[in-house]
Amino acid sequence: MSRRTRSESSLQGIPEATIARLPLYLRALYALADRDIASVSSEELAAAAGVNSAKLRKDLSHLGSYGTRGVGYDVDYLIYQVSRELGLTQDWPVVIVGAGNLGRALANYGGFASRGFRVAALLDSDPAVIGSVIAGHRVRAADEIERVVADAGVMIGAITVPAVAAQGICDRLVAAGVTSILNFAPVVLSVPDGVDVRKVDLSIELQILAFHAQRRSVVRVLHRSEREVAMPASNGSSGGTAGTLALDGDGQVAAKAVGT
Amino acid sequence: MSRRTRSESSLQGIPEATIARLPLYLRALYALADRDIASVSSEELAAAAGVNSAKLRKDLSHLGSYGTRGVGYDVDYLIYQVSRELGLTQDWPVVIVGAGNLGRALANYGGFASRGFRVAALLDSDPAVIGSVIAGHRVRAADEIERVVADAGVMIGAITVPAVAAQGICDRLVAAGVTSILNFAPVVLSVPDGVDVRKVDLSIELQILAFHAQRRSVVRVLHRSEREVAMPASNGSSGGTAGTLALDGDGQVAAKAVGT
DNA sequence: CTGACTTTGTGCATACGTTCACAAGGGCGT
DNA sequence: ACGCCCTTGTGAACGTATGCACAAAGTCAG
């Protein structure tokens, strides 16, 4: 089921991976514009954004043919086109629920207000915090979610509350009409169809980093005794579903400082 | 070239996409363990983690055969195996540079200390902040980067400083021996080979949300006047590289509240 | 006006990721 | 002890993303 028409119009057909990179290009373009650079080649822009130039050209080609062969791209024009594609030519009021450390960081975030986004309200359920002013916004009670969303026409909500409260807040946001949610709480939110959830989880990023860091350590150790890897995994009946776990420090690796 | 041996050992061959999901599974497993659930099927665990069950099984199969056919997975055993694969059975001291809102949020983050990670130090360059205590850590001067990294054997650094200062801090972290960097500053960091950088950018996530939100609006508008989409893009010579930009509000869409 | 040069936009090959569907394998009731 | 039933683990098909390499298309000098 879930047929997608994918018409020839550029409206539908932009790959998700491309969308995720457009903000990167946009940031690089703004940096160029700040330096009064009027034109840029795909090679230069790709370097500034940290991607392959062929990939950048293919990404931009999804928005249309906005470059000039032999010359490059007009910075201002491309900024406008990318902004328009991302929907940043309009104003997006955002409600932030949870005025803890993360909520405050978000409300104070510079790149927030600068390009298209605006903090419509900052909410919290803690009476000790309600009424205080953070980043120019008086913190309002979480009870006011419905009113705030309706009054300001909010379509985007950011959830920066503790994990246990996140689903409840999410439900209320959705019921009030919010269709896009940025979730910072370490839980999987369940939402009805048509609501878009993106998550930011610091812990996950750290764990991915730890994996690679450990892999580097392991590789380094294996270089010393290459023998033991060649042994295929013993898939005998040992282990299995035994009740006691062999939680000894077998797989442990020495994490020494890596002074160059 | 760039031959990869991809031996039968599980050490090398785990896809990046799988790695990125392992923390998700781990979180779901901890939640199950907290509820004293000893065994779980791929279907249940997949639902808890918000993924497809076939994907979950394939992901877990990369670590080895840790399930029991007809039964499922032993929760504690799987927690151990996933933790070990991610390198979370060892302790990772992390240095946080930048004690602004984000740095504080990170230092206070619950999921930080709980599983394998430990704040080794919190640094800042602002004399007004140095010396104050945040989340149980006395903020130290940014000058001490090298000493802190060496003393605590830090391999992971988090950068929560303003964009302009990020590359400089990054260089110093790398020079001091840090090989994994979590970057919150909205810049592309350049690092030598062998250093792993992951970025968390609130603005990018918001922009992706805005894109989808706008797309929903556009689709809704188009349903009213379906005619105009059928017209193929006029790729004539008009427009082109003209000096003046047509920055009128042509592509604007009405962002009305979405009351159910 | 012409021709050389530069850079875009894209066809194609390859790699990677996802999903289906089912055989293999283990537990459990009888 | 046997066979049914359940769930894992995986082969295969499909879809998506990436990167190379080059034709198309424009600029600019003379």
Image: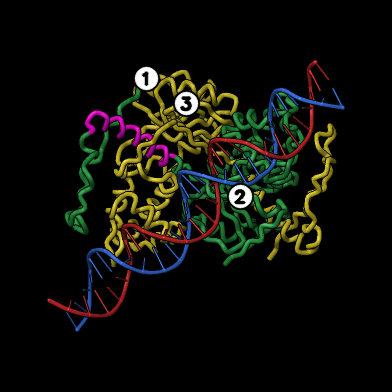
Chain colours: A yellow, B green, C red, D blue
Check disc 3 and report its element: helix, strand or loop: strand
**Gap in Å between the C-alphas at discs 1 and 3?**
22 Å
Q: Kindly identify which residue carries mark 1.
A: B260
Q: Kindly identify which residue carries mark 3.
A: A123
Circle 3 marks a residue in which chain? A
Residue B96 covered by magenta stretch: no
The three-letter code of the residue at mark 2 reads Pro
The reply to whether residue B148 is visible in this rendering is: no
The three-letter code of the residue at mark 3 reads Leu
Figure check: A63 above or below A175: below
x, y percent for residue B69: 73, 33
**Gap in Å between the C-alphas at discs 3 and 2?**
40 Å
Figure check: D13 above or below A164: below
x, y percent for residue D9: 69, 41
Q: Quadrant of the C terminus of chain B?
A: top left
Which residues, given as a range, are shown in magenta? Answer: B206-226
